[in-house]
Image: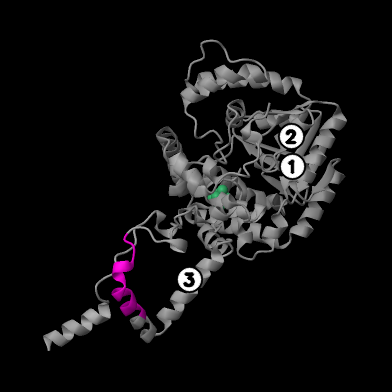
């Protein structure tokens, strides 16, 4: 029953080709513009209320940097605390291992249905697909994830996975597909937000009360006590975390925070940056196993330690998935999330995905170029990730970078000596009739695919200066 929303994005064409397709969809652009501008304005208002926002942001950056420097120590501390509180801890080096652990744990319960809290990391490891292969159905319970799952679709935003859908499209999806997954949508369903939310609530409640295994991610893992923290807005997370007899949480190793005091900083940074709220509607915290519940924590690497080894790229691991960078990105606003071909879209996706997956596919190698480098993402990032810096750094690692580097080295050699520059200018001026006016051939073709070749002047500025000065004398 899983759709592309739960499938892999690998094998997609490069970002420019995906973007071209998305740009042709005017409804998509309208939906995206409306949604991103609304969230952006809300964030701006609540952030400007805090006179110490800059200090908070610096504190968030410093805490995360400390975590990354001492990750080994904090993870072992967290593991010991979780085990002491009655939980079980599993370590997964990659997505295949994490999928194997989670499916094994579910099969051990004898259940074939699980309910899920919205979690980027379980999408990163394609958990729903892995479950389906073992005859287990994963039911999404976050409203936007439910829309994506029912619509056999892909998420397109970190916070609002169905941001590309409008109300009438959601109504159609509910009417057509809710019945395939459980309680059908009421007949005569309208497209008012309240009516749609009611339909989802009735559909999900049945699921909450009949499913015995829950799967979640976590926003934070506090090392000193082993406490996991999930922030969400709908209450579905609270149901998924408390009702099941078995709870399995899959958490990226970078989610650890040293102490409860550190959490205070992030409980201010995250809601304001993501939903534009002063505090989060539902903040659930749990330590180890609750009475009558079995708890498993799966700590996932999946490329993160490789990212950690890169001095510039590692700052991407500070990300708290607030999505503020998506909402201000002029590229994301026009093409939406699907073009990035990853569960992590937008500016953070453009730096995180190529580092986690490598840059061997056409799509992943194109992602560091999915940006105008305007810097708006850096300005809003609550943990001060310098996304433009990482983008430029990754561009130098792209497979076609050697050709680009050779071209820049040649240009540097010419520009380094006035004599060489003069000779090159005269040569190009003499050959100007042969220079194409619009598209360059060969390696320059990609560069001129979206811009004209600048016209070559009849004479260089230096030659013009010399000539006119002599004429004046
Ligand atoms: S990179 Fe920064 S702004 Fe973007 S999602 Fe991560 S924390 Fe938020």
Whole-Å distance between the Cαs marked 3 and 2?
50 Å
Most distant residue in the left direction: 472
Task: Bin the neighbour count of mark 1 within 10 Å (Cα to Cα): few under 14, some 14-19, many 20 and up.
Answer: many
Magenta segment? 424-437
- Of 229 and 305, which appears nearest the observer? 305
What is the number of the mark on residue 215?
Answer: 2
The residue that mark 1 highlights is 250
| Residue contact between numbered discs 3 and 2, judged by CB atoms under 8 Å | no
**Between residues 26 and 304, which one lies in front from this camera angle?**
26
Q: Nearer the viewer, mark 1 or mark 3?
A: 3
Q: Which residue is mark 3?
A: 407
* Residue 84 placement, left or right of 344: right
Q: CB of residue at label 1: within 8 Å of ligand 1?
A: no
Estimate the x, y position of residue 302 in percent, counting from the top left: 72, 51
Q: Measuring 72% from the left and 45% from the top, which residue is drawn there?
A: 251
Q: Earlier in the sequence, mark 1 or mark 2?
A: 2
Quarter of the rendering occupied by the N terminus: top right
């Amino acid at each position: 029953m899983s759709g592309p929303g739960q499938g892999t994005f690998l094998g997609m064409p490069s970002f420019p080709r995906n973007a071209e397709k998305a740009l042709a969809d005017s409804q998509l652009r309208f939906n995206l513009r409306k949604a991103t501008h609304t969230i952006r304005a809300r964030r701006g208002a609540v952030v400007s209320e805090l006179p110490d926002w800059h200090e908070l942001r610096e504190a968030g950056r410093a805490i995360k940097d400390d975590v990354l420097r001492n990750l080994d120590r904090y993870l072992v501390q967290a593991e010991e605390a979780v085990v002491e509180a009655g939980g079980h801890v599993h370590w997964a080096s990659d997505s295949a291992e994490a999928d194997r652990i989670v499916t094994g744990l579910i099969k051990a319960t004898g259940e074939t249905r699980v309910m899920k809290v919205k979690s980027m990391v379980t999408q990163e490891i394609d958990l729903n697909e892995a479950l389906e292969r073992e005859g287990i159905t994963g039911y999404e319970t976050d409203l936007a994830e439910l829309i994506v799952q029912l619509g056999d679709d892909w998420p397109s935003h970190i916070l609002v996975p169905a941001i590309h859908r409008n109300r009438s499209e959601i109504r159609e999806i509910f009417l057509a597909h809710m019945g395939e997954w459980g309680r059908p949508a009421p007949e005569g369903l309208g497209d008012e937000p309240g009516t749609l939310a009611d339909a989802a609530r009735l559909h999900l409640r049945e699921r909450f009360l009949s499913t015995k295994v829950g799967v979640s991610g976590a926003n934070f893992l506090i090392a000193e006590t082993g406490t996991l923290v999930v922030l969400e807005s709908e209450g579905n997370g609270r149901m998924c975390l408390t009702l099941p007899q078995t709870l399995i949480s899959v958490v990226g190793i970078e989610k650890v925070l040293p102490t409860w005091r550190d959490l205070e900083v992030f409980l201010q940074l995250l809601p304001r940056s993501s939903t534009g709220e002063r505090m989060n509607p539902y903040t659930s915290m749990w330590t180890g196993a609750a009475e009558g519940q079995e708890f498993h924590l799966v700590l996932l690497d999946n490329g993160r330690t490789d990212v950690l080894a890169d001095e510039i790229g590692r700052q991407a691991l500070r990300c708290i998935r607030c999505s503020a960078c998506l909402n201000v990105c002029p590229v994301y606003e026009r093409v939406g999330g699907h073009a990035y071909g990853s569960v992590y879209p937008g500016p953070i996706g453009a730096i995180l995905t190529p580092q986690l997956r490598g840059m061997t596919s056409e799509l992943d190698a194109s992602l560091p170029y999915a940006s105008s480098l305007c810097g708006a993402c850096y300005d809003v990032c609550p943990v001060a990730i310098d996304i433009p810096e990482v983008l430029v750094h990754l561009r130098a690692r792209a497979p076609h970078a050697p050709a680009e580097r050779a071209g820049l080295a040649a240009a540097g050699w010419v520009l380094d000596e006035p004599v060489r520059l003069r000779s090159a200018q005269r040569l190009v001026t003499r050959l100007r009739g042969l220079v194409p006016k619009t598209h360059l051939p060969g390696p320059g073709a990609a560069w001129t695919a979206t811009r004209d070749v600048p016209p070559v002047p009849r004479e260089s500025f230096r030659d013009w200066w010399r000539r006119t000065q002599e004429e004046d004398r």
